[in-house]
């Protein structure tokens, strides 16, 4: 049994959230540069150049790359041979978020009641925490800061099995088309297929965290990812929604077994400020 203190967990979470708001991932940076080479629209190219310059300034000046610094979401793989010491595990994560958003001068974007009071909690908590028990004596922590503009353009639909692959294609492309410029393209499109309604939504969220350039290991789903990306980039929405060929940087699909009567699909859209990072302790 290996002991890991809540102080270490808190510090890890804090460091991750500060880092992801300042530093764009290498995979996203490479995808943006590739998009700049492919973009045919002069306006689209100018916007991509501005995005790349913005990301450079954020990293150099240590300031947030976007004013919307997101809702804090944490995925934890907790080794079953780990003993957590020094306090409450969930509170340690939330304290890490509090300190990150205070020390990193990040905007606090969480309201306490979604419908009535809508008062800002002033520290970007509570975070959304998912814990999965796994073999081993380590803790794998993956975080993302999800902005409201792109999250608002996400959608779910309970298809029937008879609607099949074409139904999935139509829904994904239709969701992106309806979103238009609102999620700040170029975007990353996470797609969840299967499971139940809540499992499918979680699959779609996790799909947005996959490194760009990596495809689903199942060749059928990998081909579907490539086909959907091509079709989405034919929509003409383009960078910033002002026209062009680079509407999306990637389409990532995750799937899970489903009920014989169901074919749930969720599309979770992420903007080009794809803030996610991970650490193992």
Image: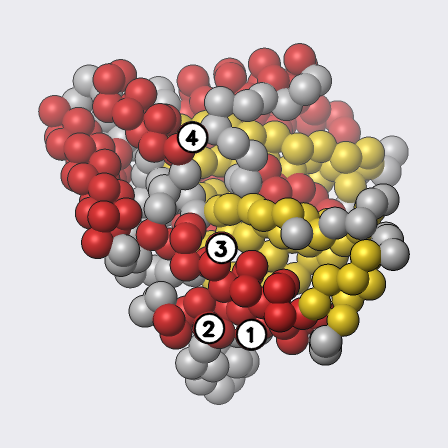
Q: Earlier in the sequence, mark 2 or mark 3?
A: 3
| Place of residue 116 in the rendered image (x, y in percent of width and height, measured from the top left) | 51, 84
Contact, CB < 8 Å: mark 1 with mark 4?
A: no
**Marks 4 and 3, how far apart at CA:** 17 Å
Can you tell which mark lies on residue 175?
none
- Picture residue at 48% right of the left edge, 86% below the top: 117
32 shown above or below 264: above
Can you tell which mark lies on residue 99?
2
Q: Earlier in the sequence, mark 3 or mark 1?
A: 3
Write down the residue under mark 3.
16
Contact, CB < 8 Å: mark 2 with mark 1?
A: yes
The crowd level at tag 2 (other Cα within 10 Å; few <14, some 14-19, many 20+) is many
Write down the residue under mark 1.
95
In this orientation, which residue lies closer to the viewer: 50 or 85? 85
Does any portion of residue 266 appear in the rendered image?
A: no
263 shown above or below 122: above
Closer to the eye: label 4 or 3:
3
**Marks 2 and 3, how far apart at CA:** 11 Å
For residue 260, side relative to residue 118 (left or right) = right
| Place of residue 235 in the rendered image (x, y in percent of width and height, measured from the top left) | 34, 26
- Picture residue at 78% right of the left edge, 62% below the top: 3
In this orientation, which residue lies closer to the viewer: 105 or 114? 105
**Marks 2 and 1, how far apart at CA:** 6 Å
Can you tell which mark lies on residue 27?
4
**Marks 4 and 2, how far apart at CA:** 27 Å
User: Quadrant where the N terminus lies?
Assistant: bottom right
Q: Earlier in the sequence, mark 4 or mark 3?
A: 3
């Amino acid at each position: 049994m290996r002991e890991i203190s809540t102080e270490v967990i808190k510090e890890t979470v804090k460091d991750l959230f500060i880092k992801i708001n300042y530093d764009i991932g290498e995979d996203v940076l490479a995808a943006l540069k590739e998009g700049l080479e492919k973009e045919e629209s002069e306006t689209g190219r100018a916007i991509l150049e501005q995005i790349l310059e913005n990301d450079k300034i954020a990293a150099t000046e240590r300031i947030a790359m976007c004013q919307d610094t997101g809702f804090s979401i944490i995925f934890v793989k907790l080794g079953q041979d780990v003993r957590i010491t020094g306090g409450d595990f969930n509170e340690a994560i939330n304290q890490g978020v509090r300190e990150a958003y205070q020390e990193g001068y990040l905007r606090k974007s969480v309201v306490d009641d979604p419908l009535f009071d809508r008062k800002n909690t002033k520290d970007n908590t509570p975070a959304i925490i998912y814990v999965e028990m796994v073999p081993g004596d380590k803790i794998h922590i993956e975080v993302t800061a999800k902005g409201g503009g792109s999250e608002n353009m996400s959608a779910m639909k309970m298809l029937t099995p008879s609607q099949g692959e074409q139904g999935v294609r139509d829904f994904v492309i239709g969701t992106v088309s309806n979103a238009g410029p609102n999620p700040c393209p170029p975007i990353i499109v996470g797609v969840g297929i299967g499971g139940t309604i809540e499992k499918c939504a979680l699959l779609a969220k996790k799909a947005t965290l996959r490194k760009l350039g990596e495809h689903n290991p199942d060749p059928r789903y990998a081909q579907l990812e490539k086909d959907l990306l091509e079709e989405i980039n034919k929509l003409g929405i383009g960078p910033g929604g002002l026209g062009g060929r680079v509407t999306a940087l990637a389409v990532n699909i995750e799937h899970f077994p489903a009920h014989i009567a169901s074919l749930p699909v969720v599309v979770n859209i992420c903007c080009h400020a794809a803030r996610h990072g991970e650490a193992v302790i």
